[in-house]
Image: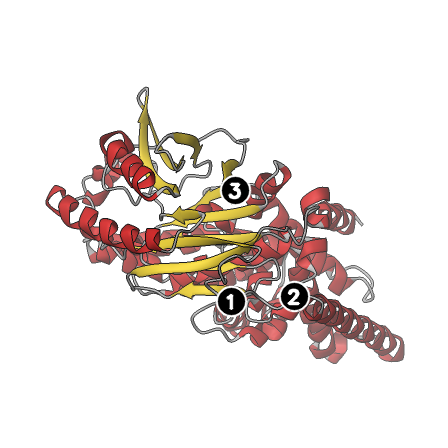
Amino acid sequence: MPRLLAAVLSGVLLALCFPKPSLCPLAWIGLVPLLLAARGAKSAWRAAALGWVAGAAFFALLLHWIYLTCRFAGVPVPVSLLAWAALAAFEGAAWAVFAAGVYRLARLPAALRPWACAALWAALEFALARWTPRVGCDLLGYTQWRFLTLLQPASWFGPHALGFLIVAANGVLACALSPKGERAGVRESVVLLRNAVVVVALIAAWWLAGTISLRTAPTPHPNPPPRGGREYLVAIIQPNVDQYRKWDEGEVVSIRSSFDRLLAQAAQAKPALIVWPETSVPGWLEDNRVWVSSWAARSGVAQLAGALTDQNGFHRNSAVLVDASGRIAGVYHKRELVPFGEYVPFRRYLEGWIGILGQMGDLTPGALKQPPLETPIGPVGVTLCYEAIFPRWSRVNVQAGARVLANLTNDGWYKDTWGPLQHFYANRFRAIENRAYVIRAGNTGISAVIDPWGRVTARLDLMREGVLYGSVPSVDPFPRRSLYSRAGDWFGWLALVAAIAALVI
């Protein structure tokens, strides 16, 4: 029972590091109870069970908004509870693999244990980042979302190195707290001290590198920027449409009227680009094409609009670029679809219970490689909603030539829960990893402009209607982007090789 409680404690402590609780420092000690419990288990299977419990507790707290979302949609309480519990149990399986690995790695020399456990965690993150269905908001580095200094080295190392450092620190602390019978006198103490010194030195070097990066960054431009400057003005529409009345045909006129008012306000500022949220057009694009094109032509401003498209029977979640003349100049189709949102596994069994699923057919994913959209502010790489939490899609966009990343989203499903905040701050990591500006347009928020150092230079908060103005410099501060953008996830591959080697040893 004590080991079981320790496992639950680890899951809870780490979940509290994410928004909204935002108790970020807990991550540096949060894994210690699980590490101690897994090392002391009687078998690898029991260690795996402890890891699964820890993971399930982590996801149950972190993703409790899944239950609330089901209830918002009118799903019965038992089905909502089942969906929430099933997701937490499913996602917790990776923690079971980690804990079983920790049990095996306890046979390594003490000098290697913390580093081997850290490599195993980073390797699992790296492998799972390429696999769905999953939520993807669980990278351990995300726990430090508040500390911009700690996030800067991600432009070199990618999304998994900070998690590696956090697990290594937890591992050294767990070794220090191990029962005396597990330590072999003076020599073990010397090894422990060496590991502690190395971890502290790495954290200090990491912090120093981040500090230098931020101090050498230019002062953010005011928003909106002064006319005649060297910045592009961007207007972001946040209509704050209630997701649960959005597909009501009786609401189409009201929704369009809200957009007309916001678009007229945005056009008065003469921005270079107006960005709409995901699926902001009420209905299919083909039924609203004249309306969208006319706004671009009347205002003389290019529009990047989220819409559902129906082309030759293929239904897709898309972002459509309409140029200043009203012509469709480019289309992006979403690649990473949301399970139970944009496609429904086991539809015949679930649709009767979850009525809202019947309002949309299964969508078709877009091609894995799609060129950036050529906009007046330069090539823009688009991610739609869920895609922003997967680092590879933003990196693929940058490698294809994008100088700006745009995340069009609709978090109206989740209302004012933890979900929209978790989703929003993932974009901070994408900006830093690729050293690129991120423009985010959300139906109910959070809409923002994030610079290549992760600083939010313009923001419109949740559940508010309005137009947000932000700026993107005409001179790219990082024309070659980042080492991570150019070299790929080299640290993830290194961690994978190191973890396999440690387990083989």
Q: Disc number at residue 380?
A: 3
Residues at marks 1 and 3, CA–CA distance in whole angstroms: 22 Å
Q: Residues within 10 Å of mark 1 (few under 14, many from 20)?
A: few
Outermost residue on the top side: it is 312
* Residue found at x 30% / y 21%: 313
Element marked by disc 3: strand
Disc nearer the start of the sequence (1/3): 1
Q: Residue 190 in the image: state x and y as whole percent.
A: 87, 77
**Tag 2: residue type?**
Pro
Residue sitting nearer the eye, 353 or 301: 301
In contact (CB < 8 Å): disc 2 and disc 1:
no
Give the labeled residue for mark 2.
218
Q: Please say which color scheme the image uses.
A: secondary structure
Outermost residue on the left side: it is 250
Picture quadrant of residue 78: bottom left
Q: Residue 84 in the image: state x and y as whole percent.
A: 34, 56
Q: How many marks?
A: 3
Q: Disc number at residue 222?
A: 1
Q: Residues within 10 Å of mark 2 (few under 14, many from 20)?
A: few
Q: Residues within 10 Å of mark 3 (few under 14, many from 20)?
A: many
Residues at marks 2 and 3, CA–CA distance in whole angstroms: 22 Å
Q: Residue 174 in the image: state x and y as whole percent.
A: 69, 73
* Residue found at x 55% / y 58%: 229
Label 2 or label 3, whichever lies nearer to me, is: 2
